[in-house]
Amino acid sequence: MPRSGAEARRRLQRAALELYQERGFDQTTTAEIAARAGVNERTFFRHFPDKREVLFDGEADLRAALTQEVADAPEDLRPLDVLLRAFRKAGRILEDNRPFSEPRLKIIAVTPALRERDLAKAASLTEALAEALRQRGVPDRLAGLAAHTGWAAFHQAAQAWIDDPSQSLDAHLTQAFTDLRALSATG
């Protein structure tokens, strides 16, 4: 039985991920997750509001890291370069946690309810990035466009990293942003 709240949370996340991989998200209950983690179901709900949030834990930390990177970027960087810098920081977090990140992304990809939640979280993060760009003086219309486009490039790079782990997420990010620039340069 885990003693600390942080340890219980980690065990719940690990148990949920294992069960989602074994049985699928829809066939897994919070009671089963709690039992696998060696805690009771009340403990599960002390840490997570529902079984979807187990896979989206850390969104507030990610938002904070991304928006802080945008705020701290050198003034002379263009908006997409600012976002690439911020996504590289987020990418390091994903890479450092690949044993969780990789199966998490795969589970989300095959589960409609999780894809829906992922889209809602992405919209919220995109708006936070747009606001951070506005705070840097990027005009409203361009800040929104850059945030949406940058998020799409980040998402593309993360999927490429899952599909081709022989390259780092940073290499996939660089390629996605290079491709984005090439698309906008063709005419």
Image (cartoon, rainbow, N blue to C red):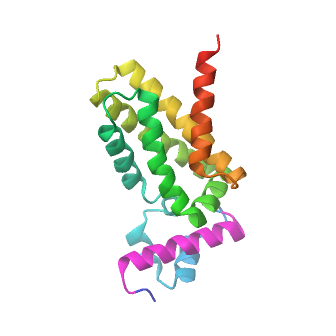
Quarter-of-image position of residue 27? bottom right
Q: Nearer the viewer, residue 150 or 2?
A: 150
Residue placed farthest to the bottom in the image?
1
Quarter-of-image position of residue 48? bottom left
Q: Can residue 18 be seen here?
A: yes
The verdict on residue 14 being magenta is yes
The residue positioned 48% from the left and 59% from the top of the image is 53
Where 113 falls versus 71 (above or below)?
A: below
Q: Quadrant of the C terminus?
A: top right
Quarter-of-image position of residue 106? bottom right
Q: Nearer the viewer, residue 34 or 2?
A: 2
Q: Nearer the viewer, residue 71 or 20?
A: 71
Kindly report the secondary structure that dominates the magenta region of the rendered protein: helix
Q: Position of residue 64 (x, y in %)?
A: 34, 49
Where 127 falls versus 46 (above or below)?
A: above
Q: Is residue 181 left or right of residue 7?
A: right
Where 63 falls versus 42 (above or below)?
A: above
Q: Position of residue 82 (x, y in %)?
A: 41, 34
In magenta, the rendered stretch is: 3-24
Q: Position of residue 5 (x, y in %)?
A: 36, 77
